[in-house]
Amino acid sequence: MKPIIYQLFPRTFTNYNPTRKRGGSREENGCGTFNQFTPSVLNAIHDLGFNYVWYTGVIRHATSEYNNPSITKGKAGSPYAITDYYDVDPDLAENKSKRMAEFTALVERTHAANMQVMIDFVPNHVSREYHSVCKSKSVKDLGETDHPEWAFSPLNNFYYLPGQPFAPQFAIEGYTENPAKVTGNDCFNAHPNQNDWYETIKLNYGVHYLGGGEKQFDPIPDTWHKMLHILLFWAKKGIDAFRVDMAEMVPEEFWQWVIPAVKKKYPQLLFIAECYNPQRYNAFLAAGFDYLYDKVGMYEYLRGVTSKNWPVEGITGQWQAVEHIQDKMLYFLENHDEQRVASGFYCGRGVCAEPAMIVAATLGKNPVMVYAGQELGETGMDAEGFSGIDGRSSIFDYWGLKSIQAWANNGQFDGKMLSDEQKNLQDFYRKLLTLSRENKAITDGDMYDLEYAQGEGFNKHEQYAYLRKAGKELLLIILNFDDRQVDMKIRIPEHAFTHLNQPEWQQATAVDLLSKTKYGTIAFNSKQTIELTLPAWKGVILQVKESKPKKQKQ
């Protein structure tokens, strides 16, 4: 199954409160809950073509209500400053005392809607105020048996700076830490600034960073055992996939040890690594990861094509760079860390990313991800509080997204409040992602890049074309990244037919599976070109079938 992933924040996705007070509290601005993901809501998500939901910000993390505001980012807090690995965020529960039961019920409802559940696993760092109250009594808490007088020991769960109290380069009140622990982004001093991950502390996996990077893995460090227990805890609750935050900040040897241990009991469970170093891709896949972020490659290039007029033909180089592992690369145009496509920092309108989205969804067998609101042209141009106008939807503030609320229509998710442009964009995503989930040529087929074979009548700086084939299902995908309508001529080289074991046809029919437009009879062979007109920022997924001439009556 090709994973088609929908990333969403429960905090904002089912928040129907229209109040958007900058820096507002949960009571003022509202907050979505697990229970608000009713079967009709989940069916609406599945209807868009998704088979995985990434519920972001589930595990309990620091918030200003429960933690010191001086070391909490925003009132809602960072979902990556975990305060209890064995708990869920109380903000997301209607009955806080039954919050875990409400979450497990959501897992069951998601499965009933024919979708899998993904959550974050944050292995590199935790909140400075980490303390688990929900773990079993037999489990020692992180740091509970540490020796703070030791800067490093594989027996410790944290790194310490003996003799140095925590003294960040900004004012804090009501919080002391002595000795200081090392900050989550490998800040090995007691004075992190506001650009550091100052609200977090780094976990110790047995690497002595200040000792030349010496690895002390025998015996197995205590942190390894604790993190295995945490992963198994969540897997037992029906989690189907983990998106692993900053996986490359944790030693590969840990992944080589822990992933097989988890998969021994839960063999179908997926691990997706947030990994930005191509030099380590092979090692992470060898360690057991199923998929890796393709951020520094395909994401960056598709963004450049869409917003900076980079040459479209360069897409070929991106998939070729990881050709041997392309099926393992997760494609996306947005996530919670990146700026929104429709923001003023990207390209200004969601419709302008349609051809890039077709590439992300159909170029390979690999998974694709959409960030909630992307399919509605969410701009991310609000000044929420801790987050300013930066083209991102805040992960630190209580907020309601106008685009999602328009789709939700107070929980009905009927889209009646959407603009015509939003409805059209969402319909495009629905058709594209459903095809990506169900069409065999996309989920299982071979890809043949046609870009190199194009000549006169085809602008490689602005247009892109490729084939996908599985069995008798043949697709010709043609994209126009230009801001004007273009006429083009597409050539299919002889090598494409031999490579795909595809016969040449003198006559064929072509139907765009996105618009259902019929293109009549075309020549699908290496001797003739296919002529096509495409509007600005559009693409077609042509289903091509042989059309045999009708026999004339005698």
Image: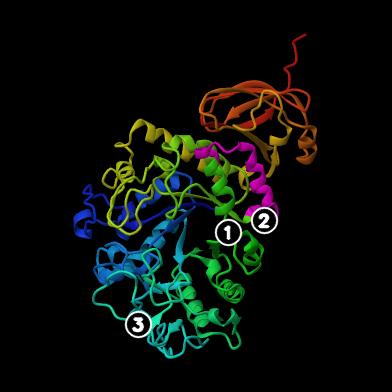
Percent across and percent down for residue 127 are 37, 73
Percent across and percent down for residue 297 are 59, 51
Q: Can residue 206 be seen in this view?
A: no
Which circle's residue, 2 or 1, is located before the other in the chain? 1
Q: Name the residue under label 2.
A: 325
Is there a contact, CB below 8 Å, between mark 2 and mark 1? yes
Residue range highlighted in magenta? 305-327
Q: State which quarter of the image contains the C terminus.
A: top right
Looking at the rendered structure, the kind of residue marked 1 is Leu
User: Which of the pair 480/514 is nearer the observer?
Assistant: 480
- Observer-side mark, 3 or 1, equals 3
Spatial distance from mark 2 to mark 1, Cα to Cα? 10 Å
Magenta stretch, overall SS: helix
Q: Is mark 2 on a helix, strand or loop?
A: helix
Q: Is residue 255 left or right of residue 406?
A: right
Which circle's residue, 3 or 1, is located before the other in the chain? 3
Q: Count residues near mark 1 (Cα–Cα under 10 Å), then give few for <14, some for 14-19, many for 20+.
A: many
Identify the mark at residue 292; answer none if there is no mark. Answer: 1
Q: Kindly identify the residue that appears in the image at 35 percent across and 49 percent down.
A: 41
Identify the mark at residue 165; answer none if there is no mark. Answer: 3
